[in-house]
Image (tube, rainbow, N blue to C red):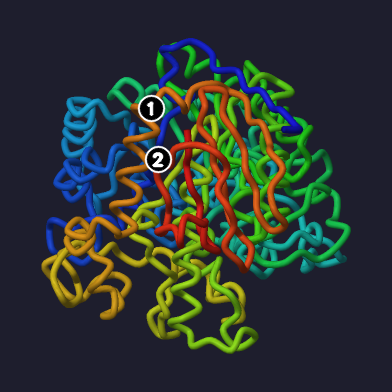
Amino acid sequence: MSEQYVTNSGPAGDWWRNAVVYQVYPRSFSDLNGDGVGDLAGVIDRLGYLELLGVDAIWLSPIMRSPMVDHGYDVSDPRDVDPLFGDLDDFDRLVAEAHDRDMKVTMDLVPNHTSDQHAWFSQALAAEPGSDERARYFFRDGLGDDGSQPPNNWTSVFGGPAWSRVTEPDGSLGQWYLHLFAPEQPDLDFTHPDVLDDLRTTMRFWLDRGVDGFRIDVSHGLAKPEGLPDMPDAVEILKHTDDDPRFNDPGVHAIHREIRSVSDEYPGTANVGEVWVSSNDAFADYVRPDELHLGFNFRLASADFAADRIKEAITESLAATTSVGAVPTWTLSNHDVPREVTRYAPDAAEQGLADGQALAVGALRARAMAMVELALPGTVFIYNGAELGLPDADLPDDVLVDPVWENSGHTDRGRDACRVPLPWEGAEPPFGFSSTADTWLPIPADWAGLTVEAQLEDIFSTLSLYRQALELRYVRPEFSGDTVEWYGAPDGCIAFRRPGGLICALNASAAPIPLPPGQVLLVSTPLENGLLPPNTAAWLV
């Protein structure tokens, strides 16, 4: 026994402190109206499945009115439901029926930018440089004698420049506006009082309808540095570092305190922020008692399947929250990162494996890592389809719709592969997701064995493993306590203990190992002559 880490469990009424939250990507969850795109009616129709799975809450990716350039993260009206998904009556019914099943409902909030179809941006384009309408965004004069160069060297997270030039009302080329993402997503300037006031109004609109909290998109990007200084180095698409001036400006924390003040008007609600920072100290600043309730920490999702990397991700994640008495969060995937089955698969060519064999190893590792994250104290987020062991889909170029694909000049395939609709039942696409086979992204025909229907009948399936693990996490007293104690383990392996008595052991080595002492509660794959096989995790008490 060596290191020990402590978390603050807080009041018993804070449901989010030990919750399992299921991310519903609405476009890909369930389509009830037959247009090939998931909708709110489809989510309502599948609430029984989520109840059977055993989750505490759902998080809805964006459902607000949007031209859907970035699939909902370009919001044109933040206080209405896009007709693609239904209407406000559907939303109210979803909240009511989820609450009837003792499930909380949280939803995406997108405060960093609007759609270019938002009324404010239309007003800004029609207004003169220096106007109040333009001050809600980052409009700047270009560099050079003729203003033909962007105001700085910032690039878009999606690829290409972060600035686009506008045509002024008189027809001349004029100012530039900032968009850290797609050109259709102009960034808002929170130094303008209208911006924060409107965000408060949006929050209260949804909270008054019974929402239990928000996932705040780009939480670390809401403030920009004075003068918008140049970036020191080029960065990869969909990446940035802690010294990147586009993100993590100190001014962001005053904005989060304002957001928290609105949430505090609605007891029992909670916000989780998308916080892409590496420094523990920087991360801790976002989850201080008067800011975010929770912050997404992506270390575990970013860690290779190697014992030292996994242990480092856990210890660093705990250190980032315990310094301020906050609650750690754990996730292995979401709509922006490759699915864990694909991510954990060894390199097929390097290992002399067929692609299917490599994915089979990835699936074993994904099962093991699910048990690791569910054994940890704090809040767990499960991305829809992870419980089915879905891999990334192998999609042809001509179906890709992620703006990253176009903005990168077809050099980065973007995130479509992890966003393919879920397979529910049947032997061929669309596997019960929709009544039409023409789904917004095609579902691989070889997913027949991964459907919910097939896995519910198989006690050894990934879905059955998740159901067992979630039930044990809920009912067993051994999962209590907010400390993690590390034990010595063979090379390539880790083992830790919760104060309640739960022991989690992971074998990331190439050979079977003896189990720690105790009674086995659950294993991710069957034991081999009493030994823990490679790519396997076990819970013991």
Give the amino acid at mark 1: Arg
Circle number at residue 521: 2
Q: Residues within 10 Å of mark 1 (few under 14, many from 20)?
A: some
Quarter assignment of residue 57: top left
Give the amino acid at mark 2: Leu
Total numbered circles? 2
Query: In the depicted view, which residue is nearer to us: 54 or 72?
Result: 54
Quadrant where the N terminus is found in the figure: top right
Query: In the depicted view, which residue is nearer to us: 274 or 323?
Result: 323
Residue 378 left/right relative to 254: left
Query: In the depicted view, which residue is nearer to us: 281 or 362?
Result: 362
Mark 1, mark 2: which one is toward the viewer?
2
Look at the image and tell me whether residue 206 can be seen.
no
Residue at 81% in and 58% down: 152
Q: Earlier in the sequence, mark 1 or mark 2?
A: 1
Percent of width and height locating residue 538: 48, 47
Circle number at residue 293: none
Q: Is residue 427 above or below residue 475?
A: below
Residue at 76% in and 63% down: 150
Q: Secondary structure at mark 2?
A: strand
Q: Is residue 541 above or below residue 159?
A: above
Query: In the depicted view, which residue is nearer to us: 385 or 179?
Result: 385
Question: Mark 2 and mark 1 in contact (Cβ < 8 Å)?
Answer: yes
Look at the image and tell me whether residue 55 can be seen.
yes
Residue 299 left/right relative to 230: left
Q: Is residue 398 above or below residue 342?
A: below
Residue at 58% in and 75% down: 346
Q: Is residue 493 above or below residue 499?
A: below
Residue 483 left/right relative to 203: right
Circle number at residue 476: 1
